Image (cartoon, helix red, strand yellow):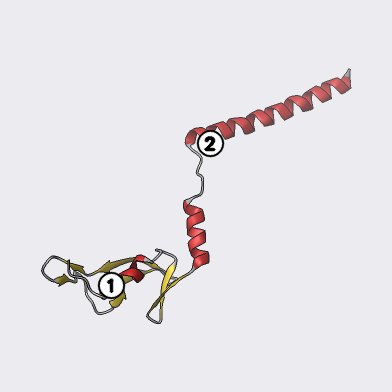
Amino acid sequence: METKDKIEVLFSIDADGYIIGYQQEFYDGKAWQTPFDTTNAIEVSQSDLNGISLSATKLIDGQLVLDTSKQAELEAEANKVIPTPEQQMINALGLQNAQLAAQVTALTEKLGGES
């Protein structure tokens, strides 16, 4: 495959300027193809393109800049443990059990004080 030092890329950005997606030209075996309007495209090396962390990288003055705190935040959210429906039910039943136990204790104390 023919390679280029830099390829044309069109970035999609969010309201804060973070890259959330991109389109890039590709080699079809005969020629480089650009299936998008290149008006706002920039040339980027493949290694720079590979280093993009979506929603944590910005294009500032023609340079790709990684916001490491934003990347850490995204990774923490992605690694967040989400309880399964069964675990949520067990937690709800545990809470209900603790509330009932507290009520039984309160009643026992009340009845014990009346004797």
Residue at the top extreme?
115
- N-terminal of the pair, mark 1 or mark 2, is 1
- Viewer-side residue, 60 vs 83: 60
- At 49% from the left edge and 32% from the top edge, which residue is drawn? 86
Q: Is residue 88 left or right of residue 35?
A: right
- At 25% from the left edge and 74% from the top edge, which residue is drawn? 7
Q: Is residue 10 left or right of residue 100?
A: left
What residue is pinned by disc 1? 9
Q: Position of residue 72 (x, y in %)?
A: 51, 60
Q: Position of residue 99 (x, y in %)?
A: 68, 31
Q: Position of residue 82 (x, y in %)?
A: 50, 43
Q: Quadrant of residue 113?
A: top right
Foreground: disc 1 or disc 2: 1
Q: How many marks?
A: 2
Q: Quadrant of residue 14?
A: bottom left
Query: Could you tell me which secondary element the residue under label 1 belongs to?
Result: strand
What residue is pinned by disc 2? 88
Tell me if mark 2 has few (under 14), some (14-19) or many (20+) residues whose alpha carbon lies within 10 angstroms of its own.
few
Q: Quadrant of residue 15?
A: bottom left
Position above or below: 92 against 42: above
- Amino acid type at circle 2 is Gln
Determine the CA span between mark 1 and mark 2. Answer: 44 Å
